[in-house]
Amino acid sequence: MTRLTKVLAVVLVLAALLLGVIAYRLAVAPKPVAPAPIAAQVRTPAAETFPVVVAHREIKAGSVIVQDDVRVVQWPVAVGQGFQDIATLEGKSLRRTLAAGEPVTQDLVMTGLAQLLEPGQRAVSVSVNDVVGNAAQIAPGDFVDVFFTLDKTEETPGAQARLLHPRIKVLTFGRASIDGPPPERDATDNGRSGQSVARTATLAVPLESVNEILLGDKEGRLQYVLRPAKDETVEDRNLFPERLPVLAARSGLTPEQRAELQSPANRAYAGDSLMQLSNAANSPNRTTPVAAAAAPRSGGGGGGGNSIQIWRGGKPEVLRY
């Protein structure tokens, strides 16, 4: 073996040893830890808000709303029957006093009595006083039974009192209204104080009953009897004789047209008379108009003619024609 060969062998052995050491170090060395991934940034969506019109300051009941009285704020929830636009409220009035920060809702805004009537109803104004008005214990929104009394007259054979119409809703009583207090007047009054000065009330009356309310108010005296709001008891008019209208139906009507006579509008148009309203037509002391037998005219030397006998105030009267 030559010297060069020996040197080369030593170099290879050293290289092998060096590679072995490197391999050992790599084998026992801890594995590098992978860098933690950067956490993804989670964006929370902005909470949804809703525009709500609220009182910017205290607004007195009945006062006219101006732009500075209200403002629009963002709330996390929508307000039922609330307003989103100030312009829709300008010039309107509130039924009750509203504190600053309270939302303005549709049920608080005065709308007029027509908006509070149910289909088929009419607002009828009648006279009241302390006695008729139940000593000022009636307030708008109450339900009353309307009674009426009649004194004995030529049209009515005897004094009488009876129920004219049950369960009528009171819309106004004096200055107080179900739609809210009069301007510049606070709703804490609620219609029950100061009612001794009340002279009129407005009632929500079915169209077919307006005539009898007007007749009872004009020819007799009405009495309003307060009743429980949940009491829905009413009379059964089918148990009593039917009142005849002022206008009789035309002859030759079809069954369909006769059925139409019972509609509220047609019954109101046909009218009601005090005699029928007081049931004087069915009084045992009064007879309905009866056609008398043909009788000669008085004073004309005889001759035929027609006549009709009518009872007025218990006395017969013959009209000839």
Image: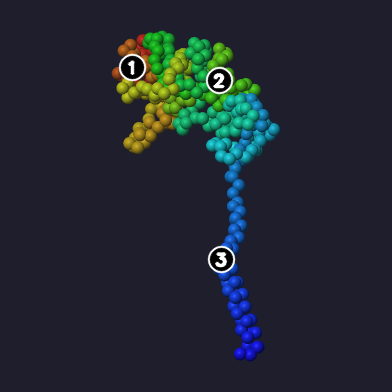
Q: Residue 174 lies in what quarter of the image?
A: top right
The reply to whether residue 132 is in sight is no
In the image, 90: left or right of 265?
right
| Closer to us: 311 or 24 | 24
Amino acid tagged 2: Asn
Q: Secondary structure at mark 2?
A: loop
* Comes first in the chain, label 2 or label 3: 3
Which residue is label 3 attached to? 28
Which residue is label 1 attached to? 282
Residue 295 position in % (x across, y down) = 32, 17
Instruction: Looking at this view, name the residue that lies furthest to the bottom.
Output: 2
The disc placed on residue 14 is none
Residue displayed at 43% across by 27% down: 208
* Comes first in the chain, label 2 or label 1: 2
Q: Report, in whole angstroms, how far the alpha carbon at label 1 lies from the one at label 3.
A: 125 Å
| Closer to us: 257 or 179 | 179
Q: Report, in whole angstroms, how far the alpha carbon at label 2 lies from the one at label 1.
A: 45 Å
